[in-house]
Image (cartoon, helix red, strand yellow):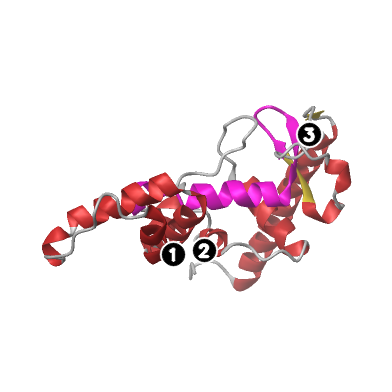
Amino acid sequence: TNHFIEKNKKEHYEYIFSCAQRTYYGFCRFARIFKEKHALEFNVNTDLCLTPLSNFKSSVKICLYDDNTRTIYPFRLSDLLNIIQRALSHSPDFFSEPLPIKNPYTNMIFTYAQLYTIYFKMRESLMIPPILFQQYFTYNFDLTLFSKYNECYIRDIAIKQFGKDATDEQKYKFIMKMLRDYNNCMKGIVIHREFKRKYILCAF
C-alpha cells in the first residue's frame, strides 16, 4: 500500500518474498520428513483396550510424531476419539471446564499440528468427528474460545455421559441431592427411604 514504491517494484519484491517463503517452507517440510524417518517407534502394538493394532485397517489407525521425544506413537482412531470426547466434555458438577487433549502415553498436551493431523485423518477415514471436536476445530483449537461459545453443547454431552457411565448408586445420590436442593419448589413431595430405588432411577 506504499504509494512511493512503483508497481513493478512491488511485484518484484512480492516475487522475491514468495520465493524465499517457498524455499523456507520446503526446508521445513524436508526437516519434518527427516525427523520422522529417523524417529524412534514407540514399542506398542495394541490399542488402549489391548487389541492388536494389526487387526485393524490402516484407515482407522494413525501414527503421531512427537517432536519433543522424537518418537512416533501409533493409535487407533476410536481411542483418540474417546480421549478427545472426555477431555472436551469435562464438566465437574455439570459446569463446563474442558481440558486440553493429552497423549495417554506421555501425558503431554497434543500440539496444534497433531490435532490437525488427527482431524484430517478422521475425515479421510469417513468417520464423523464428534460435534465437540468439530467445534474445537472451528475455533482453531483455542480452548478458551471453544469453552466460551460451546458451553451448552458441553453441558448436554456431560449430562448424557453421566447417564451412561454413572453407577446406580451415583445416580441415586445425585437425584436425592437434587430433590433436597430444590425442596422449596416441591413442597409436600417426600420420597420414603424404603421406596425402591429402581423406580426412582427409572423416573429420573
| Residue 49 image label | none
Front-lying residue, 77 or 1: 77
Front-lying residue, 181 or 115: 181
Q: Nearer the viewer, mark 3 or mark 1?
A: 1
Q: Quadrant of the C terminus?
A: bottom left
Name the residue located 65 percent from the left edge and 31 percent from the top edge: 105
**Pointers 1 and 2 in contact (C-beta within 8 Å):** yes
- In 3D space, how far apart are the residues under numbered discs 3 and 1 (Cα atoms)? 39 Å
Position in image of residue 131 (x %, y %): 55, 65
Front-lying residue, 122 or 158: 158
Name the residue located 84 percent from the left edge and 30 percent from the top edge: 38
Position in image of residue 134 (x %, y %): 57, 63
Mark 3 residue crowding within 10 angstroms, few (<14) / some (14–19) / many (20+): some
Kindly identify the amino acid type of the residue bearing the numbered disc 1. Answer: Tyr
Front-lying residue, 103 or 120: 103
Query: Which residue does the numbered mark 1 point to in the structure image?
Result: 153
| Residue 35 image label | 3
Relative to 77, say whether 200 is above or below: below
Query: Which residue does the numbered mark 2 point to in the structure image?
Result: 135
Q: Nearer the viewer, mark 1 or mark 2?
A: 1
Query: Can residue 145 be seen here?
Result: no
Q: Which residues are magenta?
A: 65-94
Relative to 149, say whether 170 is above or below: above
